[in-house]
Image: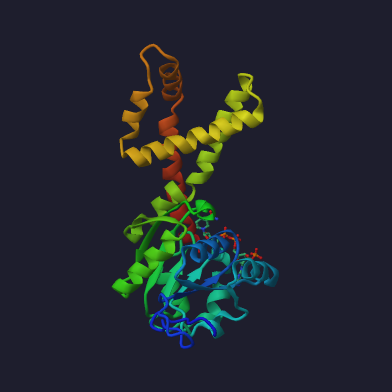
Amino acid sequence: MPMSRSTSQAASASTDIPQSPQSAVLIIGAGNMGAAFARGLVSAGGFKVLVHDIHQARVGELSRTLQIEAVTSPAAALVGVDAVILCVKPQDLAAVAGPLAGQIPGACLVISILAGMQIQDIANLLRHHGAVVRAMPNIAATVHAAATAISGNDALSEVQKSLAERIFKAIGEVDWIKESLLDAVTGLSGSGPAYLYMVIEALTDGGVKMGIPRILAARLATQTVLGSALLVKETGLHPAILRDQVTTPGGTTISAIHELEDRGLRAMLISAVETATLRSASLRQKT
Ligand SMILES: NC(=O)c1ccc[n+]([C@@H]2O[C@H](COP(=O)([O-])OP(=O)(O)OC[C@H]3O[C@@H](n4cnc5c(N)ncnc54)[C@H](OP(=O)(O)O)[C@@H]3O)[C@@H](O)[C@H]2O)c1
């Protein structure tokens, strides 16, 4: 018996054993983020996942490995779909939106993760009068550890709010934010993994400079970043308190902190977030 696409159809006719309601989610674009959503939703459970991409091979592989439905025409697959997630690059949105314009049922939630693309632009392009959520996740979605902030329009119902939260919790953590701050989220957590990769790389090079074999230096640097983040998260303590706890008077750490302050590490990172935020906003003005 084919799986239901509707949240309201929950019972198996053949066994009469009640099954959990499933939300049908259509992912458009099966690249880095689309594939991460597919894997996250399948492993979270409670979703019927459909996926579409212009590359049949990409969709075919995902559909085989995850046992999800491959869709050749998104417009023809919309009946009973509870949410559509747009996971294409901004320059490909027009090609995706063309055949979908005016076709998405009013009750279907549209989710866009396209950097810089505003809720109203998405709604206009798709001629969709229902709920739209704009989100900024990050690449850690691929390991179920994304930091995501989302914003929605007035058409969003309580049920759709919780559906959006369930979808983003399947790839990591999610918080609601006002739309005007999503460029800043792009500058902080959207682009943030790249900043931290540089930190890991630089710490590794520091270790190598001091004689540690590269593979070990990389492992130590990576685990240090991961463990420090976990400590901040799990203790809920301000990072400065945690830093003070490991800073012995006259010790090694305070010497390094002096160097980092002297060379402006903090100011550099603040400026990085600021400049990426401004860039995100300026990209929109150009389109
Ligand atoms: N990656 C990140 O860290 C990140 C973080 C936050 C938000 N985002 C946003 O997420 C979106 C997707 O990023 P990504 O890294 O997943 O991109 P990606 O890996 O390039 O995936 C996009 C996929 O969509 C396909 N595609 C292009 N045109 C299409 C069409 N008309 N119909 C169906 N599929 C089409 C692409 O094919 P081709 O390869 O041929 O183009 C590719 O397979 C972007 O808008 C980005 O702003 C990304």
Of 138 and 61, nearer the camera is 61
Residue at 56% x, 85% y is 76
Of 186 and 66, nearer the camera is 66
Residue at 41% x, 33% y is 267
Side of 247 relative to 193 (left or right): left
Of 280 and 155, nearer the camera is 155
View extreme (right): residue: 57
The answer to which quarter of the image holds residue 149 is: bottom left
Report the image quarter containing ligand 1.
Answer: bottom right
Side of 153 relative to 225 (left or right): left
View extreme (top): residue: 250
**x then y, percent, for residue 87:** 53, 65
Q: How many marks?
A: 0
View extreme (bottom): residue: 13
Of 117 and 278, nearer the camera is 117
The answer to which quarter of the image holds residue 183 is: bottom left
**x then y, percent, for residue 120:** 39, 71
**x then y, percent, for residue 1:** 54, 85
Q: Is residue 277 visible?
A: yes
Residue at 42% x, 79% y is 128
The answer to which quarter of the image holds residue 238 is: top left
Q: How is the image coloured?
A: rainbow
Residue at 46% x, 80% y is 81
Q: Is residue 156 visible?
A: no
